[in-house]
Image (cartoon, helix red, strand yellow):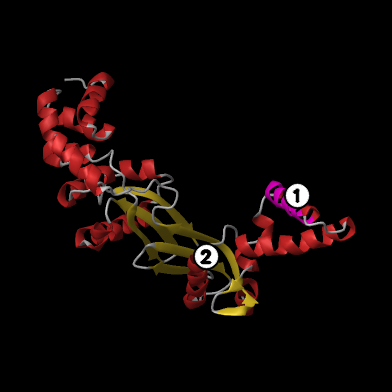
Amino acid sequence: MAITAKMVKELREQTGAGMMDCKKALQETDGNMEEAVDFLRKKGASQAAKKAGRIAAEGSTFIEVNENTAVLLEVNCETDFVTKNDTFKQLLQELGKHLVANQPATVEEALQQKWQGSDVTVEAHINTIVATIGEKISLRRFAILTKSDNDSFGAYLHMDGRIGALTLLEGTNDTEVAKDVAMHVAAANPTYVSREDVAEEEVNRERDILKEQALSEGKPEKIVEKMVEGRLGKFFEQICLLDQSYVKDPDNKVKKYVADKGATVKTFVRYEVGEGMEKREENFAEEVMSQMKN
């Protein structure tokens, strides 16, 4: 029986399962809608869909390095308790290996790739973990870096993966130096590598703000420009990695520490679990009230 887009849409609306999972279910059951629903339930996809609306802002970051390729990824779950689960930890490791090996461009592409040479998608595999653990679990984001044989990755996970930082240094094979820079990135949370990476528009906006601040303080206009440039330096120290005081040696800048090792920082990635996401606010009274109404 030919499986139409309308049938896939109908099954997806019924179960909330992924589009590819719905298509496969219909193919396996020759288009029988009821059997397809059961098929998805058995595979855990339907159960996973029921949890799709929940807030999953906990989780862990993880770093996988394989020769000249490395990935920093974030996987979210609903409670911090799950991050200590061995099944969840194994999923992080397996996803890291998959991403390094297959190098998808987006999360969406990654979820539709085949899992470890099987006919099951990455999304379907995650859904089986959801069914096992009983919480919503999602691959939120990842960044893949590649290097040459003359460069090095620095990998650092803080607080069991609450914060993950991955750096790429050129001109050195010293992974400890690269890791030191990754530790700094985790602690100081820079936005850019250097001043040159900051958009001119952002610099000009900050310059205008600093100028207005200086004038409002009653400073003579002839010294305002000099003051602004000085304060702009402080601005760069906040957001630019190379301008920051190195956390292990505050008397020196990161730029000097790296240069003394004969290296340069090409790029870095820093993830903090749940940043920018809505957090669940526990309200025990409301939870009890809602249960009593059911």
Amino acid on which disc 1 is placed: Asp
Residue labelled with disc 2: 168
Residue labelled with disc 1: 208
Q: Is residue 211 magenta?
A: yes
Image-based side of 290 in relation to 189, left or right: left
Q: Secondary structure at mark 1?
A: helix
Q: Which x, y percent locates residue 180?
A: 50, 74
Q: Which x, y percent locates residue 132?
A: 15, 50
* The image quarter in which residue 67 lies: bottom left
Q: Main secondary structure of the magenta part?
A: helix
Q: Can residue 35 be seen here?
A: yes
Query: Between 84 and 12, which is closer to the camera in this rendering?
Result: 84
The structure residue drawn at horizontal position 20% and vertical position 31%, both measured from the top left corner, is: 15
The structure residue drawn at horizontal position 55% and vertical position 68%, both measured from the top left corner, is: 169
The Cα atoms of the two marked residues, 2 and 1, are separated by 34 Å
Image-based side of 225 in relation to 60, left or right: right
Query: N-terminal of the two: label 2 or label 1?
Result: 2
The stretch in magenta equals 201-214
Q: Can residue 120 be seen here?
A: no
Query: Between 1 and 267, which is closer to the camera in this rendering?
Result: 267
